[in-house]
Image (cartoon, rainbow, N blue to C red):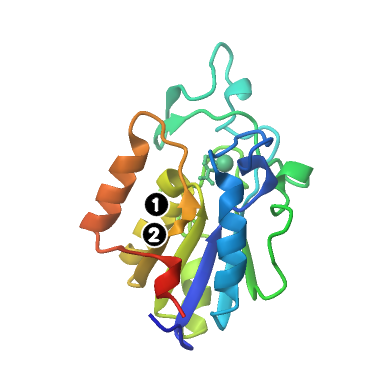
């Protein structure tokens, strides 16, 4: 694929807390930085997302008495995986990964700001009702196709890819520029779900 004026590279949550040494490290998460920097030069449009939680966020296990990270709890909007405290607004861990190029991004979307609602997706929060505004912003810029990369494949990348499809965009995931967490088979399930919804899997070498 050759990116044109209707294509945007969407870089999901490449933040210090998701890298080895961070609060919620994604195995091999640091390996996406180089490929993503290289990819950015091939796109006219780049947008970045940041997971950006308040300290009392509902997804943090330590905000639930007697609960541990990676357990699931039932919330009003459905089941929620509990995570180690991560990407707290303004903390070093919420910052972009060291070495990630950020200068060419025209848009930075922050998500997960409501204490009561998680948001893996860059488009739609976990209540499946509250919109971030990203779809509208992309449409106003004339974007029709997205290439997703970043962290984590099976959570924020997959949910964003699926919601982008539902919003009517063509969607590709750059398979060598993502890494997953894999809780109880979530990585294979995410790839299967994305394939079923028409998300294309491509290699960064095919882009340019
Ligand atoms: C993410 C779990 C919790 C992600 C964010 O970026 O994939 N995963 N918050
Ligand atoms: Zn989060």
The local crowd at label 1, few if under 14, some if 14 to 19, many if 20 or more residues have their Cα within 10 Å, is many
Residue marked by disc 1:
158
- Residue 106 visible to the viewer: yes
**Horizontal relation, residue 88 to residue 119: left or right:** right
Secondary structure, mark 1, is: helix
Res 173 label: none
Name the secondary structure under disc 2.
helix
Q: Is residue 95 left or right of residue 151?
A: right
Measured as percent of width and height from the top left, residue 105 is found at 65, 73
Tell me whether circle 1 and circle 2 mark residues in contact (CB < 8 Å): yes
Q: Please tell me whether residue 78 is drawn above or below residue 132 in the rendered image.
A: above
Q: Which residue is mark 2?
A: 161
The quadrant holding residue 74 is top left
Separation of marks 1 and 2 at Cα, in angstroms: 5 Å
Q: Residue furthest front?
A: 205
Q: Position of residue 131 (x, y in %)?
A: 48, 59
Residue sitting at 70 percent across and 40 percent down? 88
Residue at point 44%, 70% (across, down): 205
Specify the farthest residue to the bottom: 5
* Residue at 36% across, 68% down: 171
Q: Is mark 2 within 8 Å of ligand 1?
A: no
Q: Please state the horizontal and vertical placement of residue 84, each as a whole percent of the image.
A: 60, 28
Q: Where is residue 48, by image quadrant?
A: bottom right
């Amino acid at each position: 694929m050759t990116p044109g004026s209707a294509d945007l590279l969407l870089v999901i949550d490449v933040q210090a807390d998701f890298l080895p040494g961070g609060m919620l490290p994604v195995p091999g998460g640091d390996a996406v930085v180089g490929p993503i920097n290289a990819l950015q030069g091939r796109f006219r449009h780049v947008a970045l997302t940041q997971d950006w939680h308040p300290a009392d966020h509902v997804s943090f296990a330590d905000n639930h008495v007697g609960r541990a990270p990676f357990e699931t709890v039932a919330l009003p909007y459905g089941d929620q995986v509990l995570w180690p405290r991560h990407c707290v607004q303004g903390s070093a861990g919420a910052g972009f990964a060291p070495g990630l190029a950020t200068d060419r991004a025209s848009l930075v979307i922050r998500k997960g700001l409501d204490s009561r609602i998680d948001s893996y997706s860059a488009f739609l929060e976990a209540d499946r009702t509250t919109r971030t505004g990203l779809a509208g912003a992309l449409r106003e810029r004339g974007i029709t196709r997205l290439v997703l990369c970043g962290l984590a494949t099976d959570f924020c990348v997959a949910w964003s890819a699926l919601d982008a499809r539902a919003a009517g965009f063509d969607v590709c995931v750059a398979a060598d520029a993502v890494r997953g967490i894999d809780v109880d088979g979530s990585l294979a399930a995410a790839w299967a779900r994305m394939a079923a919804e028409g998300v294309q899997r491509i290699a960064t070498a095919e882009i340019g």
